[in-house]
Image: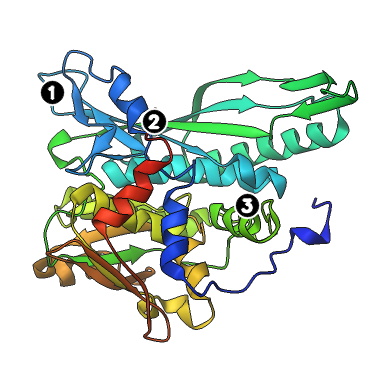
Amino acid sequence: KIDSEESFIAFREPEDHTEVFHKMISRLNLCSFEFISTQYDHEVQGNSVTKPLQGKGKVNSNVSVIRPLLDSNRGVVLSQGLYPSYSDIDTYWMAACSIDTAIRNAISAGASLEHLAILDNFCWCDSNHPKRLWQLKNAAKGCYDFAVAYGTPFISGKDSMFNDFRGYDENFEEVEISIPPTLLISSIGVMKDVNKAQTIDFKIPGDIIYLVGNTAEETGGSEYNALMGERERGEKYTGRNIPVVDAVLFKKLYSAMERAIDEDMVASCISVERGGLGIASAKSGLAGMLGFELNLGEINESNVLRNDTILYSESQGRFVVSVNPALKNKFEECFRELPIAMIGRVRDDQKITITGTDSRKIINTDLTELNYFYRKTLKKY
């Protein structure tokens, strides 16, 4: 339940979309954390297939592939999903989105839904408190419902409860601080052939860019709402329109994506998660060091959504994919009767342009500028 009517978002579409685009990719949850990836020893006997940093641009990916047995082409795909900000609205859908994202990330790299398992890590607050216990119950119900819906069993997990502080502040006033109700879902899957492992980076100029899946007005708990609230009133907006998960539709999309990757139709694939379409596209461009152009008017739902909603909604079940134009018909046939939209192409230079639903260019930048904002937040670490 929401405590205040102020949780409704009440801001206009920004006039300067380029500025917002840059600020979004600078946010702590979206920016580069390369310093962690380069310090962590991710190589064990040289078995990594796709690295934590992907493409020429070395962009953090949320999924990786390893080859445990060097005499076998089978691979293990590892990923995760995490949305503690959604708990401000509804812990049931927070759990659902975390499961869906962990699964979708794995699929984007080449895993199969038929050989996928998940793990839970609850980091919670005082469950003796009735509200916190109710939130925990709803999150556990979400875990059950969507593990069953996707056929992805929980094979392990851990709980860290009572993450609360009770004490005194600098004025010796009593304070109580609790972490957000947090659920990390990890996924582990098997792929038959690591040679087909997919990465996030745009690779070939002229490739077509597709958005797979539906985009809805689902910005509740999003990075975009948080940014706009901080800009306008000094603290984040939350909103109520939390993303929801349609497991029936999404399973069809994931099955089609499995086939597209297995049959070599896909040049790059990135799961759309925190930060939405805008950030997923930006990361694919930065990873491949290739510019791109998008037309938001090509998205089916664009006639009822604002440009900023299309760019930063965190609707689940989506991928940004680049495809060789020669495979256009084959790729579209693979997703026949499923929601996809051809929204742009990969450029042969470093320019990034995004056209809005009214055919007006709303974002005009380049990789050099975008890369600066992507890396500046944690550059001293």
Mark with earlier residue (1, 3): 1
Q: Marks 1/3: CA distance? A: 43 Å
> Residue 45, located in which quarter of the rendered image?
top left
Q: Residue at x 25, y 54 (%)?
A: 368
Say few, some or many: other residues with alpha carbon within 10 Å of mark 3 (under 14 / 14 to 19 / 20 or more). Answer: many
The amino acid sitting under disc 3 is Gly
Tell me which label, 1 or 2, sits earlier in the chain. Answer: 1
Q: Does 193 sit left or right of 154 as displayed?
A: left
Residue drawn at 16 percent across, 57 percent down: 265
The answer to whether marks 1 and 3 mark residues whose Cβ atoms lie closer than 8 Å is no
Looking at numbered disc 2 in the image, what kind of residue is underneath it?
Lys
Mark 3 secondary-structure assignment: loop
Q: Earlier in the sequence, mark 2 or mark 3?
A: 3
Local SS, label 2? loop
| Gap between marks 1 and 2 measured at Cα | 41 Å
Mark 1 element type: loop
Q: CA distance from mark 2 to mark 3?
A: 29 Å
Q: Looking at the rendering, which quadrant does residue 266 occupy?
A: bottom left
User: What residue sits right under mark 1 in the picture?
Assistant: 72
Location of residue 114 with respect to 117 vertically, above or below = below
